[in-house]
Image (spheres, rainbow, N blue to C red):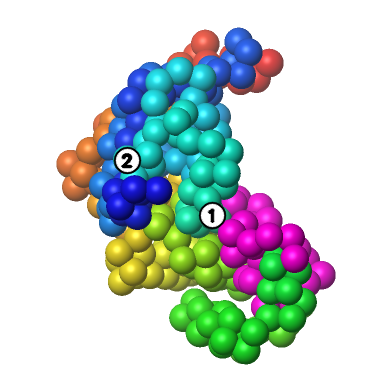
Amino acid sequence: MTRESQKGGFELEGASVHYGSVIALEQVDLKIAAGEAVGFVGPSGSGKTTLLRLLGGNLKPTHGRVRIGGEDLSQLSERQLRTLRSRIGTVHQDLSLIPNLRVLRNVLAGRIGRLSLIGAGRLLFLPPRREVAQVHRLLERVGIGDKLYQRTDRLSGGQRQRVAIARALYQQPLALLPDEPISSLDPARSRDTMELLSKVCREEGLTLCASLHDLEAAREFLPRLVGLRHGRVVFDRPTSELGAEDFRHLYDLSADEMLNDAR
């Protein structure tokens, strides 16, 4: 990895993702500077999750280029890709937590991508005291320090969301990529979660790229928004420059589209 790859920026040039005849993303050009906070908004099926998968190194474009910190994904070996992915903190929409494990082990699992099978087993089942202390500090930072040894399936939805964030932070990431991080939370917990993500990324200098359905939260917490529709970028501007007409155009369905959706 080059020095540039430690900076956590992203660049897409004509990036397209096709699944047979289905176009998930088409000709996306995008630059996101290290430490920047950006929101991806748009209707369901617009390509937001696919875009996050590209940025996380979990997907290669069908056409075009994706660079993460200056590293062209197409030029990396599988081993280099694994190393790169281990430095990107993805918070999946389903959280991808193991329900019957304690919070401690779920967070520790965030770093096993960098370890051998034996090393991963040791970390999960015989964690050094310093690692337990680090996990506890992260849990305190996200507001659930008292849940270290709690079974994850006994937590509330908001608490599980914070476990997933702590796990991503335990990776010591260059960037944080939450996919719909507040979709299952009530309004008060949604705001708390967005405040937490924004604060942590700002304090740590992490790049934040979040996919959101909640336009109010996106406009309040993210200074730049990228609007996606049918896999294409509709707008990419500072949030302060976007008005109601921009969002109406992004989400408005024509009669033909509504008919197709109903089929």
Residue 85 in sight in this render: no
Would you place residue 170 above or below residue 249 in this image?
A: below
Q: Nearer the viewer, residue 81 or 227?
A: 81
User: Residue at label 2?
Assistant: 70
Q: Secondary structure at mark 1?
A: loop
Magenta region, residue range: 92-118
Q: Is residue 102 magenta?
A: yes
Residue 229 located left or right of residue 59: left
Mark count: 2
Residue at 64% in and 71% down = 108
Would you place residue 110 above or below residue 28 in this image?
A: below
Q: Amino acid at mark 2?
A: Gly
Q: Amino acid at mark 1?
A: Ser
User: Residue at label 1?
Assistant: 86
Spatial distance from mark 2 to mark 1, Cα to Cα? 16 Å
> Mark 2, residues whose alpha carbon is within 10 Å: few (<14), some, or many (≥20)?
some
Residue 122 located left or right of residue 93: right
Q: Is residue 210 magenta?
A: no
